[in-house]
């Protein structure tokens, strides 16, 4: 388990470093009005999403690594959660940074699935609360 903890801590801090580096590179050009299609363009918004995903998924990996000693997960659930979070750590920033819309459709679905799989298995009771059930108010 120590190796898994260390690997998630490394993945988390690597995400922080890559988030800072991508932010620094984008910061060099941000003042140019037409850079990456302009501030509101799809390409530039996706690049910002990729940049912040390094920090967000990195933080999730740090928290997962720090939480492993205190949570009781089966080895199988721990493996699935670990793979989901590590997949998301690589895929989600890439989805943002690869700004070609036609390449992103499959990548977004795969990335979201990996992230949810990793996060939901950490706390099964929380995952059960996320289940969407129609209430009597929803049915008209």
Image (cartoon, grey):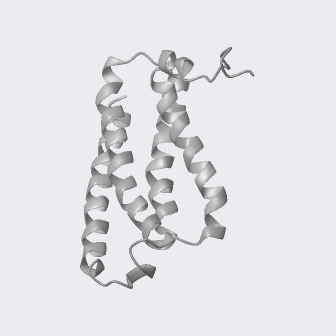
Q: In this view, does 53 lie above or below 79?
A: below
Viewer-nearest residue: 43 or 66? 43
Farthest-out residue, front = 140
Q: Is residue 6 above or below residue 16?
A: above
Q: Where is residue 37 in the image (x, y as percent from the top left)?
A: 45, 81
Q: Residue at x 30, y 54 (%)?
A: 14
Quarter holding the N terminus is top left
Question: Left or right of 40: which side holds 9?
Answer: left
Q: Position of residue 57 (x, y in %)?
A: 39, 46
Question: Left or right of 89: which side holds 110?
Answer: right
Q: Position of residue 38 (x, y in %)?
A: 41, 79
Question: Left or right of 10: which side holds 88?
Answer: right
Q: In this view, does 15 lie above or below 28?
A: above
Viewer-nearest residue: 49 or 85? 49
Farthest-out residue, right = 140
Q: Which residue is drawn at 25% across and 79% down?
A: 28
| Callout count | 0
Q: Residue at x 61, y 57 (%)?
A: 107
Quarter holding the C terminus is top right
Viewer-nearest residue: 85 or 6? 85
Q: In this view, does 130 lie above or below 102?
A: above
């Amino acid at each position: 388990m120590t190796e898994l903890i260390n690997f998630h801590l490394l993945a988390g801090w690597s995400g922080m470093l890559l988030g800072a580096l991508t932010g620094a590179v984008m910061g060099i050009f941000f003042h140019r009005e037409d850079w990456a299609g302009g501030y509101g363009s799809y390409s530039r918004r996706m690049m910002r999403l990729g940049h912040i995903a390094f920090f967000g998924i990195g933080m999730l990996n740090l928290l997962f690594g720090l939480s492993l000693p205190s949570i009781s997960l089966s080895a199988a659930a721990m493996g699935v959660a670990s793979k989901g979070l590590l997949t998301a750590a690589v895929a989600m920033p890439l989805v943002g940074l690869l700004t070609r819309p036609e390449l992103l459709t499959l990548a977004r679905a795969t990335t979201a699935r990996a992230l949810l799989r990793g996060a939901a298995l950490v706390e099964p009771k929380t995952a059960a609360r996320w289940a969407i059930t129609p209430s009597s108010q929803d049915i008209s």
